[in-house]
Image: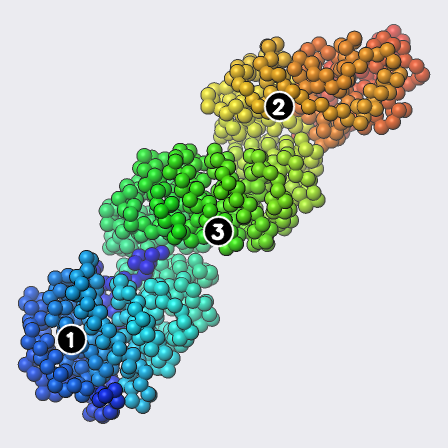
Amino acid sequence: MHRTSAGISGKYARSGNDDNQPDNHTASARCGRYRQCTVRHRDNPPRPALGHNEFYHSPGARPHQHLLRRSVNIAQDFNALIKKEIINGLVSKSDRLGDRYDGRDHGLYASSIKKYTSTSKRPLNRAEQGQLIHLLQNFTATRSWNWRSLTTTLHSFTSAGVFTAHNPIDERVKRTQVALLSTLLDAIIFNCNQKPEVRDIDARGIANQLWAMAKLVDNGQVRTPEIEKAMAALLSHVNALKDQFIPQHITNLLWAMAKLVDSGQEQTSVFKGATAALLPLVNAQKDQFNAQGITNLLWAMAKLVDSGQERTPELKEAVAALLPHVSAQKANFTPQGIANLLWAMAKLVDNRYELTPGLKEALAALLPLVNAKNNQFIPQHIANLLWAMAKLVDNRQEQTPELNEAVAALLSHVSAQKANFKPQEIVNLLWAMAKLVDNGQEQTPGLNKAVVALLPHVNTHKDQFNARGIANLLWAMAKLVDKGLERTPQLKEAVATLLPFVNAQKANFKLQEITNLLWATAKLVDNGLERTPLLTEAVAGLLPLVNTAKANFNPQEIANLLWAMVKLLDNGLDRTPELKEAVAALLPHVNAKKDNFTPQGIASLLWAMAKLVDSGQERTPGLNEAVAALLPHVNAKKDQFKALGITNLLWAMAKLVDNGLERTPELNKAVAALLQHVNAHKNLFNAQHIANLLWAMAKLVDNGEWTSELDEAVAVLLRHVNAQKASFKPQEIANLLWATAKLGEFVELKAVTSMFESLVYRISENPQLSQQNLLMSLWGVMVCCARLSMDSRSNNWFEKQMDDLFARVENTSPDNLEDQSVIAMAASWLGRACPVVPHYRTTVSKPQAEFRNQLQSCIPSLQIEEEKSLNSLPPVDLLLPDHNMVIEIQGPFHYVGADFKTRNGSTLLKIALLQKAGFEVIEIPANQLLNNDLMKPYIDQIKIRTGIPPQGHGSVSLKRRWADEACVTADDRQPSDHGYLNAQEHLEEQTGKPAKRKRKNSQ
């Protein structure tokens, strides 16, 4: 989070409490005087203990000192404080005493200015500061000043806002501020570097001076070399004086150090040493911190950890020691205290601090206070609280009723306060709402109203968002849209407003921001946002950064980047050289970091690589190695994949295999491991998951995969299709029709017709369906018609659906053979003229060639044509034109699971089409043609069919006898008798007597 909205900020601008001020006591120390840089120690008589805002006074006070000591009247006394004679008196005394002057009266004057602002409950305004600075041109600190005077002056002027830089800056004011601060810092450094026996520094002064310097830097003061040197000098004494620090000092020091680190202070060895010295004191004095101290300490430790502080045992013990006191002190926390505590706990957890029982109890104590005080939170608090709760939930904090009530209470104020949020707060609010929704928060009317209220302010503040803010805003809007937020004109305008700044700020994006931006653009486009030139330019500006930083992305970023680039390609982005280079640059790092990907990352990566290959990306050695590196991890992490991960992985592996990836043992193991979990997750799969899973399984089957696990998984999913039928989108219906048809006789015909009847009409009613989905649906309906035809059942309704689908594609000109073939087959079935001329590739298998040769040898006069395309249909193996007969030598790929029993959809459709065209079709399983002796009975039966008497004895049925056939819902399904010779027919032809027939109908 941005430093101005992430933690403790100045209190004067908002209220009168002193939440962030150190104690206002000045240090009790010995006084000293300096002559020519040599310290002469002078003992002072014992002094009484001082109260709040009291200071020692020089003996023999002048009239101007009496003025400073009297009480401040807000209405009258600022003018009294800036009388010229007061400053002249101070300058005169300093000049008169020279290096014997200890700066006491200067400190007293600075304290009076602070007292005025404390009473006013605000820092000096611009006019007051200008008047005062004009008088302070000769207000100069010297090395002769004692420690107390230096501390009082620096702390008081800082608290009062004397050093605050107002915009636009007045150069005269700036010069005086720089000169005064320079003299103070020089004197502090000088004091710190004195020998122990002569320096008069103390614990309170160190705490207050470091607090003041942190406050200066937090208010925009540049960290000059002098400030750096002064801070280092003060920090070097923390360890030596640690036993003298009281609770307030410990709080102020750790707060100051956190603020300094947050503004860019390097955590040097001296800095780390000071931190290490202070942390055990938190544990030792844990019972003495008040509510404000607890708040500031936890904020400081969270900020230090967030800025790279090591989570040492001492830090963990300090946090653990304070947490029980949050619950004990809950009634005393201010609204800002509540906001800072929740922010701190969220930051600690986000930086891998364990969500311990103590931390959960502290959260449970604070959450009801958010609801109770929801009307008292200012915009900054609202933003920080919602950010904190979103971050906690994102780190697995349970979304308890108290947390949900707190979120709802705060959301109701977002709309009312919308005009008062700063740019960083707008970023944090939208990010928080997106994260809450991403973790299951319901998109209530209150949440939607808050989002709608903020979106116009993105446009208003567009020039004020930094690189991180732009990335987080676009990520948040993409996430909200992905979770169902309507793409309103305001949202589109907000996105369009930010996109030009992506290119302008590209040099400032960190690795995670590059990742989030590409992910966001991909998600927005995937959810229907127009791919405008602005979006294309933003992506083009980011892609070279991926290549440049390729070695530095962590595993999650690599997974998200590849997913995003592939999604953009899938939605029409050009495959530019920059995109190719970015993909190629990341792939080697998949292999290098293979052991560190989460289950979700593995699923995203394999999905992305499958999509790349499917869109034409060459399967380079780099891509193959990346796939091979991930597959063993699928098996190793099989129990950790969620329903979506299982779906994407099986889809990806099916797609990769379909595009030529070798089915290695690792791939087979990965598939088998995932299939086992389909049944376990069956109730978690939504309609899209079911459609994609069945598509994937059908593809795996089509490529020769068949196991008992796949058998069971298909059966489980098919039973859920009917229950989800109302939820399937048109594309998912197309996938379902294709997959179910592809599985052929594995799925009971009754189940197929029931499913198709409930889904096909929705395809016909959808005018926006893509050509690919229309062709898939058309093919599926044809297979259904084929099965009904072969079973002598009526298919008129399905033929009507086929006719409607054909009418929507017959005038298209697909450029790939598979789509051309679907159109040709539909035209043949419907008796239409074929609008395309498919150019089929022909391949003669070894069993086919051997059988043809043997058949020709036995019947030399028989005319045989090979690989002949009939009526623009796919080529047949052997055609006997004189007898109108087709012989199909059916290899393993004609059967589900290569079992030589269960014909797949493609085989069934081809046979039915040939029969419908008037051909007699003889199917011979290739496993029955392993030698000439096995071929002879088949040749004899062909002789009978062609009217040529067979020689010898014995023949064999050309119809397959399928015993114990596996199926989804019944085990007694038999194929129809169309186009087969069986033993009974053979007997009739031999004897001239009818044989008894027994027919088993398809179930």
* Residue 75 in the image: above or below residue 794: below
Task: Tell me the SS state at disc 3.
Answer: helix
Apparent side of residue 381 relative to residue 550 in the rendered image (left or right): left
Q: Earlier in the sequence, mark 1 or mark 3?
A: 1
* Residue 497 in the image: above or below residue 74: above
Neighbour tally class for label 3: few under 14, some 14-19, many 20 plus, Cα within 10 Å: few
Q: Position of residue 168 (x, y in %)?
A: 19, 57
- Residue designated by label 1: 139
User: Which part of the image, by quadrant, shows the C terminus?
Assistant: top right
Q: Earlier in the sequence, mark 1 or mark 2?
A: 1
- Which residue is at a point 72% across and 29% down the rendered structure image? 893
- What whole-number distance in Å separates the C-alpha atoms at marks 2 and 3? 41 Å
Apparent side of residue 929 relative to residue 183 in the rendered image (left or right): right
Q: Position of residue 412 (x, y in %)?
A: 28, 46
- Which residue is at a point 46% across and 21% down the rendered structure image? 767
- Residue designated by label 2: 817
- Residue designated by label 3: 548
Q: Position of residue 465 (x, y in %)?
A: 32, 50
